[in-house]
Image (cartoon, rainbow, N blue to C red):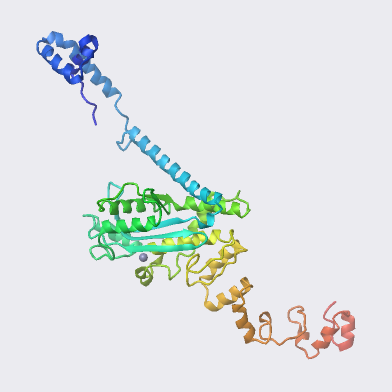
Amino acid sequence: MPPKKHNAFMTFVNEWKSKNKEGRHMSIPQAVTHCGDIWKNMNAQQRGPYIALAKDADVLARCTVERLNTQGQALSAVEREERDLANQIMLMKQNTERIVREGKENDDLENTKFIFAAFNYFIKAVGNDIYIPAEFAACEFSLKTGMNSIYSSHINPGQLIYGLSSDAMDHTSTTHQLPLPPNALGETNMGRLYENILEYLRGKNDPKKPVIVFTTTEMLPVVKGCLRYLESDCSDAEEGAIEVYDIRYLFFILKKEVADIADLPTDEITKTVTDNLFQKDFFEYHSGISCQFHEDNDRGRYCAHSMVSRWCFIFSDHMCADLAIKPVPGKHMPPQQEQRFSVTNPDESTAETSFQSCESAVKQERKYARYVPSDNSAFSADIKESNDFPSLGNRKSKPIPKRSAGNQASRDPRSAAYVLVTNRTAAEIDDAFKMPRRFS
Ligand SMILES: [Zn+2]
């Protein structure tokens, strides 16, 4: 925007006001009225200096005009935006740390509740931060109880933004594959949906305090944009009722504090390490944790319902073991999965859990039996099938220690005698059985 032009008359008013005693007591409108009469009677020569002064002021203003960046944005505005963003991130970090620290100081970190939220969207509006939502899911989580409750809904916004339907089709077909409006599924009243979501998120908490929800770094703008879209349709929505924070930062802080409580070394727990752990997402292709639509269409990976559930499982998988919390299926891990990790060895359990999802049931059972000896159910099946300890397979019990491979003596009827004399020297064995010497 070009700078405002200076006015010769106003230059005169300002000077008159500062030079006359009566002027100093006048307001601007009073001074303008008073000076109007004087200005009217002034000739061009008398007005000349004021016209020149106004022009000088214009030139000066043009020199100090705001500097722009290559995209034509005022630099000061860009800097202000960056500053605001940095402040937001700092506030997010401080609040996340505060929540975790409070839980730890009260010796109740395992019962501290967190809310995870995710959205799927059809399209992002051009030029602003609004996203048109397609599916919403949120759940309440604590380390002790795992996923306490879950709320999810498909959303039918009724219409898409004119001219953007091909973009919507592109995005949808490569991700969640939910049908596009007007054939979309789920809730059609955006205002009511917003109220329901807010009611769920608040739970029993103080309605005056903002609710904090956690989502992934990539999904921060989506969750904020979708909430803004729903909120705009709700007549009595309060601004700032829901704050959206980064779940990866929470994962990092929580993991560090949990390790500290468990007296484990915390030096190696950095944000990069925990980010990697979180992003592995090894429950990604797990069935039975998505909404029915995504379960049927095999798009569970993109389902909002599945996403928030998976985050609970990832948190549990990396932290419950440290606090000796026994994982419960459906709460700390997918419901169809057997307990495959022991609280005493978190590192092995992680590898085991992710690996086994690809294996057949039989293999899993054997592996599981070997892995968690405390659970005897898998063992007993094997024991009944054979007459011996499962590790010996179907062989009959023989008091024979294993020798080198291909030892014919073990299959020889005489081997029993052979075993009894193993403490004798090779020469003595040869003598006893009249056989060629095998050992030297
Ligand atoms: Zn879904």
Q: In the picture provided, is 14 more to the left or to the right than 113?
A: left
Most extreme residue toward the left is 41
Q: Position of residue 227 (x, y in %)?
A: 32, 53
Whether 84 is drawn above or below 407: the answer is above
Which residue is at 37% across, 59% downward?
A: 200
Report ligand 1 position as a quadrant.
Answer: bottom left
Q: Position of residue 360 (x, y in %)?
A: 52, 76
Q: In the picture provided, is 35 more to the left or to the right than 63?
A: left
Q: From where the camera sits, is residue 20 visible?
A: no
Query: Of 3 and 248, which appears nearest the observer?
Result: 248
Whether 299 is drawn above or below 101: the answer is below
Quadrant location, the C terminus: bottom right
Which residue is at 47% across, 61% downward?
A: 312
Q: Position of residue 31 (x, y in %)?
A: 18, 16
Query: How many labels sit on residues?
Result: 0
Q: In the picture provided, is 307 more to the left or to the right than 5?
A: right
Q: Quadrant of residue 30?
A: top left
Q: Quadrant of residue 392?
A: bottom right
Quadrant location, the N terminus: top left
Most extreme residue toward the bottom is 413
Q: Position of residue 32 (x, y in %)?
A: 16, 18
Q: In the picture provided, is 369 more to the left or to the right than 167?
A: right
